[in-house]
Amino acid sequence: MEILVCVKRVPDTAENEIELNSAGNDIERDDLVYSVNEWDNYAVEEAIQIVDKVGGTVTVVTVGDEDADEVLRREMAMGAQNGILLNDEAFEDSDAMGIATLLKAAAEKGKYDLIMTGAQADAGYAAVGGMLAAMMDLPYASLVNMVEVGDGKLTVGREIEGGNQEINEIELPCVLSIQTGINEPRYVGIKGIRQVSGIEIPEFDAAGLGVDPATVGAAGAKTKRVDYFIPETGEGAEMLTGSTEEIIAKLIDIMKANGGLK
């Protein structure tokens, strides 16, 4: 099975203190520590496990500048066989539709049975996977937390409201957006990264993808962020002290005072 996994280089929230930029429309990105998007990491692990069972190859693709190369190599050290970098100044500030347009062009350069994305990335739109499927006229399932390979189709589990599980059959080729918790992504050590450091990663610009630069990037974005803010911190939590009986009594009084109990 030939699998394409779309990944993204994002700020590592565990390693950074997030601040707004001077324009107030984004975070300050200078000197940030970056890593692979968490959801994408689960998608790559699932792809590797599928290929381990049924054979094939895993290719990882990302839209970004030359620094995004490190994300591809990290996922290749994890077990993906190939990487593709989509890099062009014209791609900067692409919205979800622009990213999906670029990924579609990259996917059409190969012949993939399955395309996978993370359920969402740092922008939180959770839109790229669905848009990509629609553009390619392929069946699509989101929030996937179980995949079983069948003959020309997959059985997938989806996480739905209320913590319930929905099971579907979906024909190949298709697009899946992968939820965290579907597996346990394997550890990637320095030795593994060194082993893939010399592998050549193909790079495509707009011309190489056959994409009109006016349809992607800031020029083609239909959605533009006009404001970005961190909500003001409210009052801290009230800590109740005393014996168990005293804490229960205080809690009941608080709930009554706030309309929680009558």
Image (cartoon, rainbow, N blue to C red):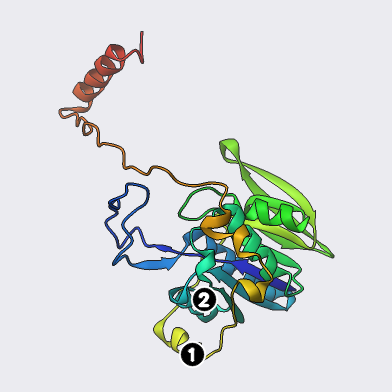
Which residue is denoted by mark 2 in the rendering? Answer: 72
Mark nearer the N terminus (1 vs 2) = 2
- Crowding at dot 1, Cα within 10 Å, few <14 / some 14-19 / many 20+, comes out as few
Q: Quadrant of residue 81?
A: bottom right
Of the numbered discs in the image, which one, if any, rests on residue 195?
1
Foreground residue among 207 and 35: 207
Name the kind of residue labelled 1 in the image. Answer: Gln
Q: Is residue 48 visible?
A: no
Residue 25 coordinates in the image, percent (x, y): 37, 48
Q: For the residue labelled by badge 2, is the local secondary structure a helix, a strand or a loop?
A: helix
| Residue 117 in the image, given as x and y percentages of width and height | 60, 60
Per the model, the C-alpha gap separating discs 1 and 2 is 13 Å
The residue lying toward the viewer, choosing from 53 and 195, is: 195
Q: Residue at x 58, y 78 (%)?
A: 83
Q: Secondary structure at mark 1?
A: helix
Q: Residue furthest top?
A: 262
